[in-house]
């Protein structure tokens, strides 16, 4: 009688997030096999530490990936980025990271990879688009972390403030990777279908304009923090949640970067609510954002398209 | 260093549901202490079997309650009912069960009980009202199973049909305990806030009028089945879920019988969506039912009131 | 991406233990598919109740087995027994149950069954032997419940009395199915390898001859109880533990009935410590029982062989 | 109704192990409150990252401890150590770490601390002794990590090699913190009480002298690795296991550093098998080591006493 079928993950990256993700895989995704495709640089001691730690929690193995592994891999998790040079501009740094990711994706495709790609390398919207271009994989298989962490935090904050299980709170932050391109969609947020804006108006609920401002400033603070610090515990936790939804084929409604058409723009990488399951993302019907939210989103989409044009020009 | 604090439950009843609930408590609610207040009749062998089975799963104890136990009990689960006599009418049978439940509640209150009451004795709407009357406890502490099983089934059927995690499906069956008093609120059902009726209209979603009919007939079938059979695996599973929400103070949105005011009627026991947590039920803001659904509900409320009048007349 | 591979179980039996085992399978073994081969008699309502209850706990399906199912089944759990006639002798009753089990095994083998068989029909030692004869399957694939529940209880009682995690207590009750054929192997019982008889002699440990007598009388009481009552919560819990060890290929040291050679007797069904994993049982090296324990075991073996002779004579 | 009672931990340290331990506490020990007593240096960003990550896994809070927190703390986990200076000798470095740990313990005791202390700062044998001296707490409340990781690895390696669940393997590495003071007690290792040396002699078991050598060299390699690298995934995993045993009062047999009397030496910090539960360690009866193992242990005890003399001379 065979044991349960193992899932196979290749983690591409050499920062703390990649090792932390691997460690959590053992605790939360088993049975799973985690391989490291170590770019940019190798830290073998971390892998040995992971191996020794696995003796406290069976059923997981860690090793260094070789190119043959891509063929049988279910999920590619990309956290890789170059070390930033002193005084390097954002654009120059992004261009170097593009070369790095391109190299991995080309290698993966040349070796028969056909799984899902989960992207945490920033800016995740740009890399979601580029991985799609580099790989030729179907759109629904390419997913960027996008505003997933922000939406989850928004949901939890509302849950606590309103005294409602987070399971019953729907709350989405959508848009792009940069701070000013995030749109907090209050109009669409609801508890089991009851709009939160309605609850705010009902005085009994004890939820007012001030609470809204507090929540927004807490979200801004997190956003800022994540840009300044490699918050690897949080990022790895988020990647694990998403991997779980994929491996269990849960079809959960989450906010992730994927390619969407908006107005007359096609294949724009935006973070929007989507169902995540074993085959990647599935869109759900048209969302009823407010007019101002729609306007903001369109603006973000245009700016993203312009930035992609600049990149694609080389 | 002490172990974690145990919760204490008294189960009132002597049918399969009561033993099954106790058994599941051990597996799903530990650390918990389960006592039996054995009405109408004692089956000590079942309790000994439960005790021996607990050696496969530590941290649970089973025993027979004495009246002093009511004081420190967190949750009273009532499944008790008399054995039905041949050719006994519904009304006569209900009156005998009322005497049984009244006896327990009076005993509990006389001994300082101040916890929550979860009622599975049918008809749960009538008993929710009567336990409130008999006990003098605050309304929010008295909960009837009502349409909880039906709503959960509705949610799961929609989840499967639509290919969406049940976590993200909101779907409620509301109303009373009798078959014809159940209202399936399609108008309010949604996925993360997107109305399901809208999804049904969208042809891409492959969800049509036929699917709706199939779901409704499956729900009717279950309803009928539960009236004819003591479906103790299902009922005990439902009671355990609710106990978990209570003990973890989850404040989850569920459909349960509790006392509501509707139009000019007050304290009518209806099964409606409500938040369930450690202190019992909390109402959420006005629900946006459709006009026809509201009309149906009002009809159910009136009929329930009339039946209660008949009972209260003695 | 596929979900995890489901295991398939056929439960043969129509008493409470069989339904309880199926229900627990859903909670503890998922993903699993449970089929009922309903002998002696059908109770479809129980299966429908199980099906409805599964909406509270996904990933399990229940249905009635047809003969084609035997081919792909991993585990056959046999709890079947005829209803006992008034004034029927043990021997006559056993003969009727033999016909029942024989019928199932012949049907299973004719349809390509090649999995493991776990036997709870009493006397489990006799049926372990007979299923081996009827099926022609390798010995290591046929397992009887034997003294598993007794050994586990012994272990837990020692754990509580000595204040040591049950994980670290090794304690075995061996022998046959009848009350007088159980041997409590104090000589072999130990904590992490330290003999318990030694600990009893050490006065600091506060464990004396009286404690030994108390434990033995508690064990006798359970044994007696299990003969008089269908203790289905306990039996189903035990069967689930064993199924888990099998499906996870845990190779745990447990006491189960299997065919052993002892002195010059071959293929005697005795309950003895053995490793249980995905391929069934594996024997471990010679156990160091005391001389008196060995003598008792040999006596049990001889009596079992005589009873089997009587049965095989027809 | 209140939530379950939270346990409170103060983590003393500012290296990766301390943050990793805190992160794992959230996943494995909840409900728990983790406070950081940040010596030697503060890294507030890590704590904020932990706080944000907790939104993926409720019921845990992280914050910086103040001195008042010691009073209500159940467990003090010490991983603190100074940053090593270039060319600093072992002895000089240890002396600086002693000052650091002394400062914390004095502060804890001055503020009413009365919980357990779990020590991961190396050398853990020396610090187990010193924390006992500094604190005045009862011996059974002071525990050093000692050879716990090594024993666990030994157990797992035997489990894999022998094809037996690790639950049933008893295998202990005992002694001191330095490499040459570890004693692998083959004589005492057993499977459910069956000596492993006996199994090795039995040819059927396919376990020979070569396997023994392979296991020993793997253990040496891990030991060497742990001295050269801060293997924080492994160390934090081990500390979490031990914390779990403590909070659940499991009384598990594990190898930990605690104060023992050996021959005519008293209060020597040695890593030896002991029961770990909510009140700390309890000794079990005399262990039956082989003569050569006993001799080795006595040698280690003497060397440890000499080193402690040197330290205590100042």
Image (tube, coloured by chain):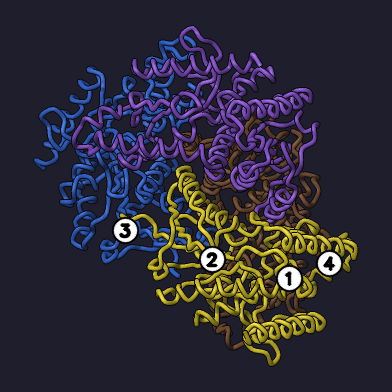
Chain colours: A blue, B purple, C yellow, D brown
Closer to the eye: label 2 or 3: 2
- In three-dimensional space, the C-alpha distance between marks 2 and 3, rounded to whole angstroms, equals 45 Å
Residue B9 visible in this rendered orientation of the protein: no
Residue A306 location (% of width, % of height): 13, 32
Closer to the eye: label 2 or 1: 2
Seen at 68% across and 71% down, the residue is: D192
- In three-dimensional space, the C-alpha distance between marks 3 and 4, rounded to whole angstroms, equals 54 Å
Q: In this view, does C288 lie above or below C234?
A: below
Q: Mark 4 points at which residue?
A: C199
Disc 2 element: strand
* Letter of the chain that mark 2 sits on in the rendering: C
* Letter of the chain that mark 4 sits on in the rendering: C
Q: Could you say which is closer to the camera, residue A6 or residue D109? A: A6
The quarter of the image holding the C terminus of chain B is top right
Q: Residue D82 carries which label?
A: none
* Letter of the chain that mark 3 sits on in the rendering: A
Q: Name the residue under label 2.
A: C77
Q: Which mark is residue A37?
A: 3
Seen at 69% across and 46% down, the residue is: B60
Q: Are dots 4 and 2 on a single chain? A: yes
- In three-dimensional space, the C-alpha distance between marks 4 and 2, rounded to whole angstroms, equals 39 Å
């Amino acid at each position: 009688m065979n044991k349960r079928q193992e899932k196979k993950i290749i983690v591409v990256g050499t920062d703390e997030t990649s090792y932390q993700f691997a460690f959590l895989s053992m605790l939360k995704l088993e049975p799973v096999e985690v391989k490291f495709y170590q770019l940019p640089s190798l830290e073998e001691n971390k892998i040995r530490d992971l191996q020794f730690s696995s003796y406290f929690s069976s059923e997981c193995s860690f090793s260094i990936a070789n190119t043959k592994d891509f063929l049988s891999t279910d999920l590619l998790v990309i956290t890789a980025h170059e070390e930033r040079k002193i005084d390097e501009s954002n654009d120059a740094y992004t261009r170097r990271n593009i070369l790095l990711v391109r190299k991995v994706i080309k290698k993966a495709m040349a070796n028969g990879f056909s799984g899902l790609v989960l992207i945490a390398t920033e800016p995740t919207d740009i890399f979601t688009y580029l991985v799609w271009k580099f790989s030729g994989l179907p759109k629904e298989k390419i997913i960027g972390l996008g505003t997933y962490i922000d939406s989850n935090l928004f949901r939890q904050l509302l849950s606590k403030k309103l005294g409602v299980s987070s399971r019953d709170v729907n709350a989405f932050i959508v848009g792009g990777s940069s701070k000013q391109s995030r749109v907090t969609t209050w109009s669409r947020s609801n508890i089991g279908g009851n709009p939160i804006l309605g609850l705010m108006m009902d005085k009994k609920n004890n939820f007012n304009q001030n609470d809204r401002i507090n929540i927004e400033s807490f979200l801004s603070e997190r956003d800022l923090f994540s840009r300044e610090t490699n918050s690897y515990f949080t990022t790895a936790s988020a990647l694990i949640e998403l991997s779980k939804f994929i491996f269990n084929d849960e079809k959960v409604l989450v906010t992730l970067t994927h390619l969407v058409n908006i107005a007359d723009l096609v294949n724009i990488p935006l973070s929007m609510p989507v169902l995540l399951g074993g085959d990647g993302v599935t869109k759900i019907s048209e969302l009823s954002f407010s007019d101002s939210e729609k306007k903001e989103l369109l603006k973000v989409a245009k700016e993203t398209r312009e930035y992609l044009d600049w990149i694609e020009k080389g």
